[in-house]
């Protein structure tokens, strides 16, 4: 969001950018060519959700992304244009998906549906596949007919007579992996928004899905290229208050600093942005206050016991059904084309990875 003053755009302006995720960082990079830009970042590093770390391997260190990992041209056109402009190398990636439930007693992967051979003899599994085909064909057509924007995904599935096998063994695990939220909470997600998202990302297609890509060397490559163009970067400097005044906008930080700017761009989560505003308008309070967030523990490791039990069922995205709630393991070797030892990024592991991993 932008907090503006009435300053004339014809002169060189002094602009504060709060945050350093890709939206804030690219904004600062663009504005910096014509204006004085000061970027505030509460962490000691730039990048926000773009977080690349070095993993020590027998053959040396490799760069592994633990936040933002993949993108595609259809739904990330501006990011693609930015990466092309910066000459950031990218590569195609694999976006396979696996489900492991009941401590590995039920597993499958796409495309390895019968990685667990017992699935051939499971009526529930065949019912799941049949309803998967029906959902993929019907849901996109239903978008126009969904007159109630508040109709939940759970109620939509009931109204169209989709059963527990499809819901619990495929759709909700897939949604949980995408939104990094416990599967049962996705029943309350608005059906129209869910179906539209899946349609836009090509998730309801059997053929012709978007080609996904990843940044070679990790997402920090583009973060570093954008940052090199900026002079006024202030790391470990949380913004505590953004105050509108007749002369412009005053930014207060946690170190006691207070500086006047012509404009402020806040590139942070909605709840964080709202907490910064000294006197939010009614619209700002209504819009920014509508968002809710959840926290996930993310661990980079090499413990294969936090993957599906059968290696044949491994995929790039692996939903691990646990009693504790959401757990997803990403196989980084296939996602980023990493050589050598298997590396995983796991959200909310039910137990810590082995100490030697």
Image (cartoon, rainbow, N blue to C red):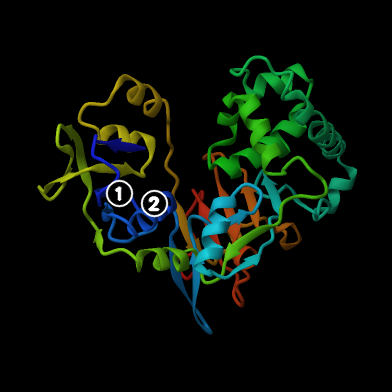
On the image, the x and y values in percent for residue 320 come to: 62, 48
78 to 138, vertically: above or below: below
Q: Which mark is residue 27?
A: 2
56 to 81, vertically: above or below: below
Quadrant hosting residue 138: top right
274 to 98, vertically: above or below: above
On the image, the x and y values in percent for residue 85 come to: 52, 64
Quadrant hosting residue 155: top right
> Relative to the observer, which residue lies in front, 26 or 333?
26
Q: Which mark is residue 196?
A: none
| Dot 1 crowding, Cα within 10 Å, few <14, some 14–19, many 20+ | many
| Dot 2 crowding, Cα within 10 Å, few <14, some 14–19, many 20+ | some
Image point (76%, 61%), residue name? 312
Give the left or right position of residue 84, taking residue 278 as reference: right
On the image, the x and y values in percent for residue 188 come to: 58, 24
Q: Which residue appears farthest toward the bottom when viewing the image? A: 59
Earlier along the polypeptide chain: callout 2 or callout 1?
Answer: 1
Image point (66%, 49%), residue name? 74
192 to 112, vertically: above or below: above
- Mark pair 2, 1: CA separation: 8 Å
> Relative to the observer, which residue lies in front, 118 or 73?
73
Label 2 with label 1: CB-CB less than 8 Å: yes
- Asked which secondary structure carries label 1, the reply is strand
- Asked which secondary structure carries label 2, the reply is helix
> Relative to the observer, which residue lies in front, 64 or 82?
82
Image point (23%, 56%), residue name? 236
Q: How many marks?
A: 2
Q: Which residue is mark 1?
A: 17
């Amino acid at each position: 969001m932008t907090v503006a003053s009435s300053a004339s755009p014809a002169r060189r302006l002094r602009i504060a950018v709060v945050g350093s995720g890709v939206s804030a960082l690219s904004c600062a990079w663009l504005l910096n060519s014509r204006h004085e830009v000061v970027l505030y970042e509460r962490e000691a590093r730039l990048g926000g959700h773009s977080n690349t770390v070095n993993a020590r391997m027998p053959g040396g260190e490799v760069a592994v992304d633990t936040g933002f990992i993949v993108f595609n041209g259809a739904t990330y056109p501006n990011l693609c244009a930015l990466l092309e402009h910066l000459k950031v190398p990218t590569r195609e990636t694999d976006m396979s998906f696996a489900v492991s439930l009941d401590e590995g007693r039920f597993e499958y992967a796409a495309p390895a549906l019968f990685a667990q051979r017992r699935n051939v003899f499971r009526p529930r599994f065949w019912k799941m596949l049949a309803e998967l085909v029906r959902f993929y064909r019907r849901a996109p057509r239903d978008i126009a007919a969904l007159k109630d924007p508040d109709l939940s995904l759970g109620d939509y599935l009931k109204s169209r007579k989709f059963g527990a096998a499809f819901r619990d063994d495929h759709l909700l695990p897939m949604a949980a992996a995408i939104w990094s939220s416990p599967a049962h909470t996705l029943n309350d997600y608005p059906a129209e928004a869910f179906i539209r998202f899946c349609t836009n990302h090509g998730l309801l297609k059997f053929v012709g899905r978007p080609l996904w890509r990843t940044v070679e060397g990790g997402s920090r490559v583009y973060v570093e290229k954008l940052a090199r163009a900026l002079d006024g970067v202030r790391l470990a400097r949380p913004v505590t208050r953004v105050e509108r005044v007749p002369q412009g906008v005053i930014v207060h930080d946690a170190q006691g600093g207070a500086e006047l700017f012509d404009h402020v761009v806040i590139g942070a989560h909605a709840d964080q942005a709202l907490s910064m505003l000294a006197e939010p308008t009614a619209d700002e309070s209504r819009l920014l206050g509508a968002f809710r967030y959840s926290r996930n523990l993310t661990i980079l490791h090499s413990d294969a016991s936090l993957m599906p039990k059968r290696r044949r069922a491994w995929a790039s995205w692996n939903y691990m059904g646990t009693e504790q709630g959401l757990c997803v393991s990403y196989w980084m070797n296939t996602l980023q084309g990493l050589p050598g030892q298997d590396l995983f990024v796991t959200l909310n592991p039910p137990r810590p990875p082995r100490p030697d991993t």
